[in-house]
Image (spheres, rainbow, N blue to C red):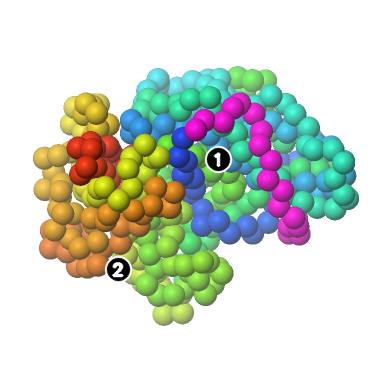
Amino acid sequence: MHKLLSLIAIAAGLSAPAFAQIAVAQHDGTTDFTSRGITGLQDGWAHNGYKVDRQGGGIGSGLVGWTTIMQDQNCATLETFQFAVFGGNADRVTGLPGTPGAWGQPDSWPDVNNVLGATATFFSPAGQPAGACAWIYTTNFASPVDMTTEGDVFTSTLLVSNLGWTADGSSSHISISQASAGAAAREYPITSADANTNNEMNNEFGICWTGLGPASGGGVLTPGSKRFWLNNLRYNHTSRSGVEDTSGQFGALFGALGPQNFGMAGDYPDAANITGQPATTPRADELIWSDQHATDFAAGSGIGQVLLATTMLRDLIAAPLPLAGTGLLEINPTDPLFNIGASIPGMVAPIVNLGTPTIYDPLIPLTQQPGIAPILHINQVSIYAQIVRLDLVAGTASLGSCDAHSFRL
């Protein structure tokens, strides 16, 4: 269904923590249409995967909740809703849990037995006027959930069967990604020439799964097309990787507020248009980072700096390094790129506003930086980053979550 009417904000579920929150999305915020992903003949969960082992998971970056957008084609009638966050690593065939703690395991599927949080079944608000509307539900945990042991998490929505759902029933907002050459899609990179890269993108990032899974007596989990349910995870004290389009296409084609994109194109940027997009729809991405500081970190008294590396400590010692009073160092401090951000204008920024994300936008593009530019053209290269916050008055520090830019030829 394409008709999206009033947006109604409502809170659902567990309880509200008093923490700073930042949404971690896999899309640019555009809504293309609504969908169930399954037929109206059956109940089923719509799952959207987040690779927490790539983006998120640092101490101080616990999961504080999630946001779900639901379309109701007739708000005058009550609909049944339930939302959940599941862990990953389920076996494709049985639906049962896979290897525990398999950080970075490829092709992870939702594990419906690994419930990180779930609302009770509830009804949409009564007494509403007839017609279509969209409900925005916010679900909070009583306290942040540590994501360091999770390889994947899935924001999931239970869609109750309704044969007449196109006229009266619930569905979820969808953002379609276009992976074909020549597309200037913000959400997803174009198809890679590398088979392993395509496997990663097609089976791990942002794919919608539907079905309850055999372990719960439902149908087999089925991966859908490259779509993104518009449901966001929310983290405390976090940072994100992204890109900034220099061609002007993002705003012109998608009505975006600006050229910054923290959707899937931010995970797989095309920093030098190496994919050869045509002149009418070029990709010319510059790397940027965003960081939102917790309320207990003083504004105007410190700085944030982006730390870079091409390797992670998990690759070397199987576990991140806890730093007392600071957080969890995920990236490799012996990597040649570590701390190089200190010499790049724009990679260090003052902490001024705790409620608005700070954008770290290199004044000199990283694609032109000595020591960085050459590796951007190597197949299967990732640049990992963490943002360290230094309170120069209190003498304290904290680390943001681990983020990654991946470059694929």
Amino acid at pointer 1: Asn
Q: Quadrant of the C terminus?
A: bottom left
Amino acid at pointer 2: Ala
Residue under numbered circle 2: 272
* Residue 307 pos. (x, y %): 21, 47
* Residue 212 pos. (x, y %): 64, 28
Please report the residue visible at 53 percent of the width from the left and 24 percent of the height from the top.
Answer: 142
In terms of depth relative to the viewer, which is nearer, 284 or 59? 59
Please say if 159 is above or below 131: above
Residue under numbered circle 1: 48
The answer to which image quadrant residue 124 occupies is top right
Q: Answer few, some or many: residues within 10 Å of disc 2's Cα (few below 14, many 20 plus, some between 14 and 19).
A: some
* Residue 98 pos. (x, y %): 45, 22
Is 32 included in the stretch rendered in magenta? no
Q: Which residues are magenta?
A: 1-18
Please report the residue visible at 53 percent of the width from the left and 66 percent of the height from the top.
Answer: 256
Please say if 261 is above or below 103: below
Q: CA distance from mark 2 to mark 1?
A: 30 Å
